Image: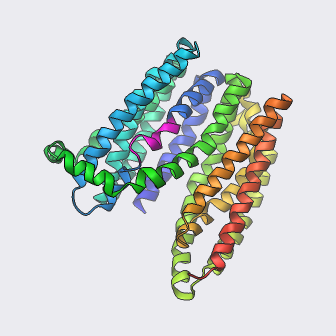
Amino acid sequence: MLLLTGSLAAQVFSVITTPVKTRLFTVEDIGLFTYITTVVGVLVPVIMGQYEAVVVLVKRQVYAVIKLCALLCVLSTMVFTIGTALYYLYQEKFLDNIALILYMPFCLLITGVVNLLSAYNNRCREYKLFAKVNVIRALANFIGVIILGSLGAGYIGLLMISLISQMVSLRKQAESLSGHLREIYSAKRRLVIAIAKKYWQQPAVSMPGTFINTLSYSLLAICIKEVYDDLAVLGYYSMSMALLGLPLGIVSSNVGKVFFEEAVREKNETDKFYHSFMKTTKYLLVGTIPIFILVYILAPWGCKIFLGVDWEITGIYIRYLVPMFAVRFIVSPLTLSIIVSQKQYYNLMIQALFLISLGGCYYMTISEALSIDYFLTIVNWSYTGVYCFFWMMCRRLSLQPK
């Protein structure tokens, strides 16, 4: 309950921060910030090979796992940063992307440390700490937007805020681990290698799935930048995604927890969980349809009032994406069916379908020189189709016995 309260408080700060940000930063600032953070964010699931999950799982030798993760984080950061710099140097776009190249090592290192500490905090069941951290980061982000936005810091200011909001909670998160630095440093190389071999499934199986999951949505922003080369378009798009994603983060995840609990109980009792699946589907349908109809009707006007007069286009983009987010809102909690059925590899197949759909939309847009309106429309309906297929697959799983 405490973790939920912290998450809700953080979401409230996020809502309050958004109209402040759109009035202190330009559309182009937000567009360039989105592009840089998206490119770097795609690499985050890869930097530690998903070995950070092992920190929670192991009974012993946790410090060897932490040392393995730290080494991978530093090595991956160096490789990705140098590789990115060489790529843009070869493309003769090094100076155009200097902010991305400079931001990348700081972001990857800080995010890696945060994820590693979060895994250790989770191991120690420090749930109260998670609630505090969520609020501290959201508050730091809010204060940073006001100060740097007022100083006209532009997209550089937004990148600094992103890093600072991650860093402010590091000391608090590290308290339970700081007394064990000697054990981490002294972990034998032989033991670290043995841990890497024992849990080879993390980089071989878990990492590709998480990477593709991140890529399927992150590539949308990258595609828009590559196709239209217009930071304003990317800024409007990123804000539409952020606003549509707010109810998904607040409601959908909590409904998913309730569904998962009920589905597991029903599965243990009857060998199926069809009743829980359909009950949750109906509940989400009843709540989703009227809400998203209102969003569709009011979006342009609402964005003009909430974000400012320059942001009415965001409301138009929201209209293009409403069907996809409505279906996603319904399906997302129900995707836990694959865990209840222990068919996690299905998720990799679905994420691959999203990538194939996006590839088709990208090719069609390039071939036909489609406008951003048409691009968002075909992405919307192709992704909606994949989500509907995902729902049907989960429904089938709910009917299958063990």
- Foreground residue among 126 and 344: 344
Q: Position of residue 288 (x, y in %)?
A: 72, 60
In which image quadrant can residue 33 be found?
top right
- Foreground residue among 91 and 3: 91
Residue located at (17% from left, 42% from top): 185
Magenta region: which residues?
Answer: 41-49
The quarter in which the N terminus is drawn is bottom left
Report the side of 121 relative to 131 (left or right). Answer: left
Residue located at (46% from left, 58% from top): 4
Residue located at (62% from left, 45% from top): 216
The furthest residue to the bottom: 270
What is the total number of numbered labels drawn onto the structure image? 0
Q: Position of residue 172 (x, y in %)?
A: 28, 43
Q: Position of residue 263 (x, y in %)?
A: 56, 76
- Foreground residue among 66 and 27: 66
Q: Can residue 68 be seen?
A: yes
Q: Position of residue 31 (x, y in %)?
A: 63, 26
**Does 281 lie within the magenta span?**
no
Residue 204's place in the image compared with 339, above or below, is above
Q: Can residue 295 be seen?
A: no
In which image quadrant can residue 199 be found?
bottom left
Residue located at (33% from left, 34% from top): 74
The quarter in which the C terminus is drawn is bottom right
In which image quadrant can residue 362 be found?
top right
Query: Which color scheme is applied?
Result: rainbow
Report the side of 259 relative to 73 (left or right). Answer: right
Residue 125's place in the image compared with 395, above or below, is above
- Foreground residue among 143 and 369: 369
Residue 115's place in the image compared with 33, above or below, is below
Q: Main secondary structure of the magenta part?
A: helix
